[in-house]
Amino acid sequence: QVQLIESGGGLAQAGGSLRLSCTASGRTFSYATMGWFRQAPGKERDFVAVISLNGRLTNYADSVKGRFTISRDNAKNTVYLEMNSLTPEDTAAYYCAASRNYAVRTTQGAFDYWGQGTQVSVSS
């Protein structure tokens, strides 16, 4: 099993920035691709960003392209989500996810492990 713990959420003003972190523990050798999803109140959980094991391949939702950056430090078993130019529409619970597969996919079904989520709230 792999446990994922997110941190870094909180309250930000529109135009501001936040950096989320997700640290994995447990059988950390058993996952490869990492991703971030988010779920706003009353909405479905949506894909945000994904990164390959070596960090060379990334993919982003159109709504965050150019504003968010995903990265990872495998030595620390940690993946990051740098969020800039935040808007109230970015308000959501953000979830870290890990996949046992090396393929870089954007669907929830491609991920095997999930964190508990961290709340991001952006005020206008």
Image (cartoon, grey):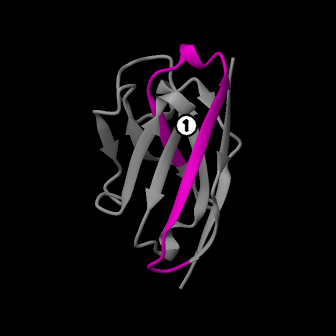
Looking at the rendered structure, the kind of residue marked 1 is: Thr
Q: Which residue is drawn at 31% across and 39% down?
A: 58
Q: Horizontal and vertical percent for residue 122?
A: 57, 74
Instruction: Choose between 106 and 72: the one closer to the eye.
Output: 72
Task: Give above or below for 6 relative to 98.
Answer: below
| Quarter holding residue 33 | top left
According to the picture, the residue beneath numbered tag 1 turns out to be 78
Residue for point 34% across, 48% down: 60
In the image, is 119 to the left or to the right of 67? right
The reply to whether residue 44 is visible in this rendering is no
**How would you rate the neighbour count of disc 1 (Cα within 10 Å): few for under 14, some for 14-19, many for 20 or more?**
some
Front position in the image: 69 or 97: 69
Extreme front residue here? 75
Instruction: Look at the numbered disc 1 and give the secondary structure of its residue.
Output: strand
Horizontal relation, residue 6 to residue 110: left or right = right
Residue 99 shown in magenta: no
Residue 93 as seen in the image, left or right of residue 65: right
Q: In this view, does 11 lie above or below 81?
A: below
The number of callouts visible is 1
In the image, 77 versus 103, the foreground residue is 77
Looking at the picture, how far across and down is residue 25, in whole percent?
67, 26
* Residue drawn at 50 percent across, 17 percent down: 100
Work out whether residue 79 can be spotted: yes
Is 19 included in the stretch rendered in magenta? yes
Instruction: Name the residue located 52 percent from the left edge and 19 percent from the top edge.
Output: 31
Position in image of residue 11 (x %, y %): 64, 72
The picture places residue 90, in percent across and down from the top left corner, at 50, 66
Q: In which quadrant of the rendered image does the N terminus lie?
A: top right
Which stretch is magenta? 13-37
Q: Quadrant of residue 112?
A: top right
